[in-house]
Image (spheres, rainbow, N blue to C red):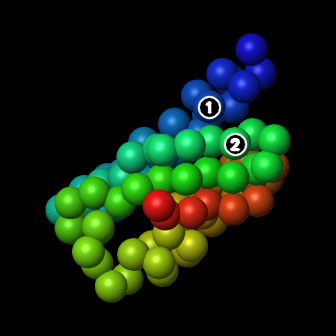
Amino acid sequence: MKKNKNLDKLNKILDEVRPALERDGGNLELINYDQKKGLVEITFQGACAHCPLADVTLKHLIEAEIKGQMPEIKEVRAV
């Protein structure tokens, strides 16, 4: 039950950051959430998939926002 609550929270956070990506023609998809390892894996879509600044967006926007609201998350990776 707790896992579903955390997954719901994670999806809500991702929904909060999506508009910033969508403004530039991109998006993201949640691929995996390993609660035990504190690992979130996403994939970039659209313009974000080939953007040279995707790593910056990943660490300074997406990962920062997730960790700010879910301190148990240790890392967010793009796969």
Q: Position of residue 9 (x, y in %)?
A: 61, 34
Disc 2 marks which residue?
Answer: 34
**Quick one: label 1, few (<14), some, or many (20+) residues within 10 Å?**
some
Whether residue 75 is visible: yes
Q: Position of residue 29 (x, y in %)?
A: 39, 46
User: Quarter of the image holding residue 76?
Assistant: bottom right
Q: Position of residue 19 (x, y in %)?
A: 32, 53
Closer to the N terminus: mark 1 or mark 2?
A: 1
**Quick one: label 2, few (<14), some, or many (20+) residues within 10 Å?**
few
Say whether residue 69 is left or right of residue 19. Answer: right
Frontmost residue, 62 versus 51: 51
Q: Position of residue 31 (x, y in %)?
A: 48, 44
Whether residue 24 is visible: no
The residue depicted at 57 percent of the width and 73 percent of the height is 59
Q: Say if 37 sits above or below 56 in the image.
A: above
Disc 1 marks which residue?
Answer: 7
Say whether residue 24 is left or right of residue 30. Answer: left
Q: Secondary structure at mark 2?
A: strand
Q: Say if 48 sits above or below 70 in the image.
A: below
* Residue projecting furthest to the bottom: 52
The residue depicted at 49 percent of the width and 63 percent of the height is 78
Label 1 and label 2: CA atoms lie apart by 10 Å
